[in-house]
Amino acid sequence: MRIAKMSVLASLLVAAAACAPKQQETAEPSAFEVIFSRKSVRSYTDQAVSDQQVEQILRAAMAAPTGMNLQPWRFVVVRDQAVKEALAGGFNKMIAQAPVVFVVCGETTMMRKPWGQPDAEEVEMENGNWTADCAAATENLLLAAEALGLGAVWTACYPYEDRMGPAREALGLPDNVSPYCIVPCGYPAGDDRPKDKWKPENIHYDKW
């Protein structure tokens, strides 16, 4: 009899659990939500950015479009304080204050076969698309940081020699690799908000 009562009680508990409202799972933001919420974040807390987060961000960066699939982008992840301070120089102290800094670089010349000559030997050739490819990778990087709840800001390096020179020296870049931009990244310390940049007057249809 006692076993029967326990069986009935167990059945009632199972039924109650099935009828209870399920706890809503936290949904990941959509691509549009991430795009429209992205903003330039220039101050950060001391909270560390994990290696897993860094890899996720770089995976997103390398998913960017690239001319002829050359993928000329190269990334230097900087955590060392002395290197961050060298990158910051006298123009941007926030670089030294960020927990992690991404330096997006590009190979300006690459070993490849001449276009339309699949049987030819590889030769060193200028890559005129490296800046466009690095720009696409940087935007993906910024959006990935936003999606992870981090803040980042695109800090120009190329084509300013007074910024590129110190970056080359601090990072020990090869001759054919140029620094494109520096992106400090971390958990936002302030309440930065995205800017509304929608301007219909900038749009033309079919002709100017």
Image (cartoon, helix red, strand yellow):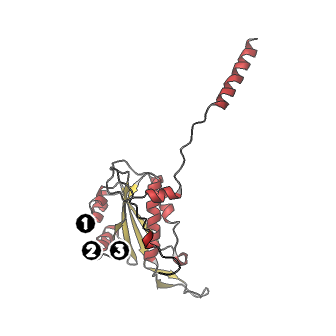
SS type, badge 2:
helix
SS type, badge 3:
loop
Q: Is residue 92 left or right of residue 59?
A: left
What amino acid is labelled 3 in the image? Tyr
Q: Is residue 135 left or right of residue 191?
A: right
Q: Is residue 89 left or right of residue 56?
A: left
**Marks 3 and 1, how far apart at CA:** 14 Å
**Marks 1 and 2, how far apart at CA:** 10 Å
Using the image as rendered, state which of residue 179 and residue 139 is in the foreground.
139
Reading the image, the residue beneath label 2 is 162
Q: Is residue 57 above or below residue 202?
A: above
Reading the image, the residue beneath label 3 is 158
The residue at 27%/74% (across/down) is 162
- Whether the residues at callouts 1 and 2 have beta carbons within 8 Å, the answer is yes
Q: Is residue 11 above or below residue 108?
A: above
Reading the image, the residue beneath label 1 is 91
The residue at 39%/55% (across/down) is 151
Using the image as rendered, state which of residue 122 and residue 189 is in the foreground.
189
Residue 94, quarter of picture: bottom left
